[in-house]
Structure formats: C-alpha cells, structure tokens
Amino acid sequence: MGFFEPFGKLAVQKSALIEINEREKEIDVVAKIPRMRRKDIKIVVKADSITIIGEMKYEKEEKKKGYYYNESTYRRFQRMMSLPARVDPKKYKVRYANGVLKVKLKKAKKKR
C-alpha cells in the first residue's frame, strides 16, 4: 500500500468537485467526495449558501520483531458556495453513497 493509497485521488485533490442545479421548487447540490465516510462530512445550510466540510484521518501501525511501521495522514477541506436562490435552511435531505454526496434543498417560499 502506497503512502496516498488510502485516500486515492482525494489525497492530491484540494477539495470536492461540486455541481449545483436549480429546479422549480428545489436546488440540488452534488459533490464528488471519494473514499470518505458520511460521518466525516458536515453540511451547513444557510438561506443563501451551503458549506460542505470534510475531514479524514488515517492511521496505521505495525509492530513485528525487528520492524516498526507507523503511518498517519490527515486531510481536511471546506467549500462554501452561494446558492442561486434562497432556501429554507431547515428543509433539506442528504444522501451519500459511492463517494457522491447529494443534498436536496427546498427553496424558500417567496414573501408577498
């Protein structure tokens, strides 16, 4: 196993690749975050923005007779994006599978 192998491309990638799509009643945010666990991803939604924070830690230690190996890696990224329309920060759904984070944000109702 090479030094960056536990993290794959994310080890050299500075942050997640993100796509934002506006629909009639919602905004979809899709972020490609390979080899990260859902519990290592934090999402902060505000009325006009979304922030995605990822933090990974990897440690490996081997002790054998006449041999000691210790490796640790830490990786963190944070991306804040303005949204194309206002959303309700309390109404969103998150799904993460196979390295792809999908966030569905409900648009805020327009005030009359």
Image (cartoon, rainbow, N blue to C red):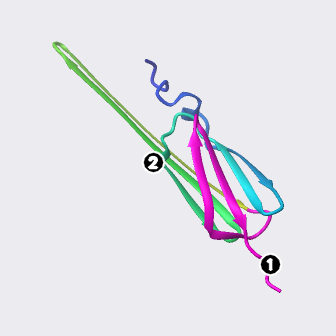
- Residue 34, position in %: x, y? 58, 35
Q: Is residue 104 magenta?
A: yes
Q: Which secondary structure lies at badge 1?
A: loop
Residue depicted at x 63% and y 69%: 89
Residue depicted at x 59% and y 40%: 33
Number of callouts: 2
Nearer the observer, 46 or 58 = 46
Q: Is residue 70 left or right of residue 28?
A: left
Which corner quadrant holds the C terminus?
Answer: bottom right
Residue that protrudes farthest toward the top in the picture: 66
Label 1 vs 2, first from the N-terminus: 2
| Residue 25 falls in image quadrant | bottom right
Nearer the observer, 43 or 64 = 43
| Residue 93 falls in image quadrant | bottom right
Q: Which secondary structure lies at badge 2?
A: helix
Residues in magenta, as a range:
83-112
Nearer the observer, 86 or 51 = 86
54, above or below 22, in the image: above
- Residue 31, position in %: x, y? 66, 45
Gap between marks 1 and 2 measured at Cα: 34 Å
Q: Circle 1 is placed at which residue position?
A: 110
- Residue 45, position in %: x, y? 61, 64
Q: Three-letter amino acid code at disc 2? A: Lys
**Mark 2 surroundings within 10 Å by alpha-carbon count, few (fewer than 14), some (14 through 19), many (20 or more):** few
Q: Circle 2 is placed at which residue position?
A: 39
- Residue 27, position in %: x, y? 75, 58
Q: Which mark is residue 9?
A: none
Residue depicted at x 59% and y 53%: 94
108, above or below 32, in the image: below
Q: Is residue 53 left or right of residue 112?
A: left
Q: Three-letter amino acid code at disc 1? A: Lys
